[in-house]
Structures are given as C-alpha cells and as structure tokens.
Image (cartoon, rainbow, N blue to C red):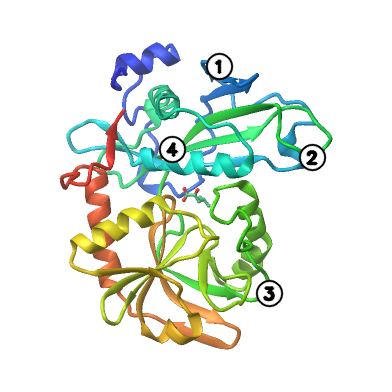
C-alpha cells in the first residue's frame, strides 16, 4: 500500500496537496463545522461483489428513489480519526477495531461485509485525496473519517437490498461538545431494545435520540443518558457515546449490556486505565444504587474523545461529580498524546496511512 505523501495526494486528486494545505483556522474547528471537504470514495456491491471504488469529486450521490435506505433504513456507519503526528507522518487510530465492529454490524443488519484490506484502502484513498484537510500537528484538531454503507437497491417490499453502496467521507474536526457538560437522564424514552440493534452502529439508534436530545438541549443539557429499556434501572448509553465512571475507589466502570455500542475508544480506555493502575469493571450498573459512588463521569467515543460530565439530572434530582475530573483528564491527555505521537504507541493502535 502506498504511504501518504504529497505525490499520493496529487495522484488521486490531480493537484498538489500537503497536510494542512487548506489553511483553515484549525484551532477554531468544532465537530461538524465543516461540510465542504466533499471528495469521497464510493464502492458499489452488486451480484455478490464489491467494485473497485471511485473517488467522487462532488458532495452528492445519485440514487434510486426506492433505495432501501430511504424506507427501511439499511444504514450503518463508523467513525475514526486521523492525526498528523509529531514525526510528520499521518496515522489513523485503531481502524482495525472499526472494521471488526462494522463486520459484526453488517451481519446483524443483513448487509454484505468487506475485507479489512478493502476497508483500509478506501480510507487511505480518501485521506490521500484530502490531505489538505488533515489538521497539522499541534493544532488540537483531527480529520474525522466517516465510513458508511447503505442499501441502495430499489425495492418496495421489506427485505435486504440487492445493491449496497459503501462510502467514506472525511471532515476536519475539533471538540464535539467544547468542554464539560451537564447531562439529563432520559426517563420518557428508550434508546434501544435488549435484543434489538443497540450494539450496532446503525443510523436508527441515533435517530431514536434526536427528539429526546433536542428536548434536553432546550432545557440546557447538551447530552442525554439512557437507562436499559427493560427495567429502566441500569446505565446504558449517552446520546453520542459510551458511559464511563471513575468510582470513589478508583475503578474504571463501564456498563455491560447487549444493547450498547461496542465503543472502540472505550475499549482502548479500558486498556489505558489498567496500564495506569486502575481496576477496570465492565458490568451492569444500577444507576440509583451506584450514582453516589461515582467520583467522575465521562462520555467516551471517537467524536467526543472523553467529555467530562459534570452532573446528571434525573427529574428533580441532580447528582454532581468532582471537578476537575483528574483521572479522566489524565486519561484524555494520555490518549491524545498517543494519537499524535507525543507518547509511544505501545499498544499498536495507530496505522500509518
Ligand atoms: C463517533 O463518535 O465517531 C460517532 O460516530 C458518534 C456520532 C454521534 C458523532
């Protein structure tokens, strides 16, 4: 596989490029502020096979009006970040784990899988073609990579599509929430059923959060926390990300549930926590019985990295956590240092592009 260089960028895009060449005000970026780096890659699956993929130089896809995705929601996605590292190289964080999660999700959703090689190459091609938008080392920003697949075949009856389109787009991003957040515990809605698709990164799980999250935002809470749908007792998932707490006895605690997303960031943080001398527990968390034992709470995921949750409000009750969140902050610093090459990648999470 060719490593990224100005030449690779030029080859794919027809013009010379370099890291940071777009010259944006990188430190001012927030997550989702740029929707204009529109060169994306598109692969189509038909008759049991993926094609070789093409780079599309506009932000549009032409699709049959009866495409499955528009009606029955065969749609799944991933999210990764690409960093310009201290040594000048461009690397992606743990996309091996994203491929594994995508594969499991596609199986649950009746969608075709792809080889790790195809997945990584699609990412490499689109990053190479968007080198100008990779934020420079030291900017604090990164290039977000969004692979996604949709049922694109025309059909009116419910069933798996006979054609799928896999695309990868990129966007330079900064912080998702821009600081620590107060959270609302949602009792009026559920995110995902125990035997549903909560563990899959499918579009529908995020659609379920749109109205509750909008209501919470209007009440001053940028993020929602959901409990399990069966008993409304156990901690489940935030709107955008996994839940993690540091308990008063210094345990890194995260929910074990069949209906939460298998967060790649959370998995890595479990490894880091152990490495930093914390105990790690992944188990059911009874919210009311345990919330008072939480010293710190964080939302953890690719987009949010580790966002400190200052408080959780449930109806009239407000539970607050220690500020500053020393342990979560040091985990955040450690993770970011590994991602940009300030510290050695001793767990082998980075892949050079
Ligand atoms: C991510 O963190 O990468 C996600 O896909 C979550 C999304 C709501 C931004």
Label 3 CB less than 8 angstroms from ligand 1: no
Of the two numbered discs 3 and 4 in the rendering, the one whose residue sits closer to the viewer: 4
x and y, in percent, of residue 62 in the image? 70, 24
Where disc 2 sits, the SS reads: loop
Label 4 CB less than 8 angstroms from ligand 1: no
Q: Earlier in the sequence, mark 3 or mark 1?
A: 1
x and y, in percent, of residue 245 in the image? 37, 72
Q: What whole-number distance in Å separates the C-alpha atoms at marks 3 and 2?
A: 30 Å
Residue bearing mark 4: 99
Q: Earlier in the sequence, mark 1 or mark 2?
A: 1
Return the residue nearer the eye: 346 or 333.
Answer: 346
Say few, some or many: other residues with alpha carbon within 10 Å of mark 4 (under 14 / 14 to 19 / 20 or more): many
Of the two numbered discs 1 and 2 in the rendering, the one whose residue sits closer to the viewer: 2
x and y, in percent, of residue 261 in the image? 50, 55
Say few, some or many: other residues with alpha carbon within 10 Å of mark 1 (under 14 / 14 to 19 / 20 or more): few
Residue 188's label in the rendered image is 3
> Does the CB distance between marks 1 and 2 fall below 8 Å?
no
Q: What whole-number distance in Å separates the C-alpha atoms at marks 3 and 1?
A: 45 Å
Q: Quadrant of the N terminus?
A: top left
Where disc 4 sits, the SS reads: helix
Where disc 1 sits, the SS reads: loop
Where disc 3 sits, the SS reads: loop
Q: What whole-number distance in Å separates the C-alpha atoms at marks 4 and 1?
A: 18 Å
């Amino acid at each position: 596989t060719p490593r990224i260089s100005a030449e690779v960028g030029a080859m794919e895009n027809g013009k010379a490029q370099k890291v940071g060449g777009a010259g944006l005000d990188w430190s001012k970026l927030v997550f989702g502020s740029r929707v204009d780096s529109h060169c994306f890659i598109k692969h189509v699956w038909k008759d049991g096979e993926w094609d070789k993929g093409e780079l599309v130089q506009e932000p549009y896809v032409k699709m049959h009006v009866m495409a499955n995705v528009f009606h029955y929601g065969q749609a799944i996605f991933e999210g990764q970040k690409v960093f310009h590292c201290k040594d000048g190289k461009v690397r992606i964080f743990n996309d091996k784990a994203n491929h594994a999660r995508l594969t499991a999700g596609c199986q649950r959703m009746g969608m075709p899988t792809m080889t790790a090689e195809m997945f990584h190459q699609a990412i490499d091609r689109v990053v190479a073609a968007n080198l100008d938008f990779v934020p420079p080392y030291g900017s604090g920003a990164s290039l977000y990579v969004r692979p996604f697949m949709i049922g694109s075949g025309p059909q009116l009856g419910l069933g798996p599509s006979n054609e799928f389109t896999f695309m990868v787009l990129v966007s330079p991003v900064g912080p998702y929430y821009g600081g620590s957040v107060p959270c609302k515990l949602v009792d009026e809605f559920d995110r995902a059923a125990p035997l549903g698709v909560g563990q899959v990164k499918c579009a529908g799980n995020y659609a379920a959060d749109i109205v509750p999250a909008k209501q919470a935002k209007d009440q001053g809470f940028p993020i929602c926390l959901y409990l399990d749908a069966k008993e409304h007792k156990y901690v489940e998932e935030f709107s955008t990300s996994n839940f993690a707490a540091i308990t008063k006895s210094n345990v890194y605690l995260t929910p074990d549930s069949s209906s939460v997303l298998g967060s790649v960031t959370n998995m890595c943080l479990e490894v880091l926590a152990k490495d930093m001398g914390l105990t790690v527990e992944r188990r059911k968390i009874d919210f009311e019985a345990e919330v008072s034992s939480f010293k710190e709470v964080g939302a953890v995921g690719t987009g949010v990295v580790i966002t400190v949750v200052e408080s959780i409000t449930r109806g009239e009750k407000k539970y607050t956590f220690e500020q500053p969140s020393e342990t979560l902050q040091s985990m955040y610093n450690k993770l970011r240092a590994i991602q940009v090459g300030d510290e050695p990648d001793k767990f082998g999470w980075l892949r050079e592009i």
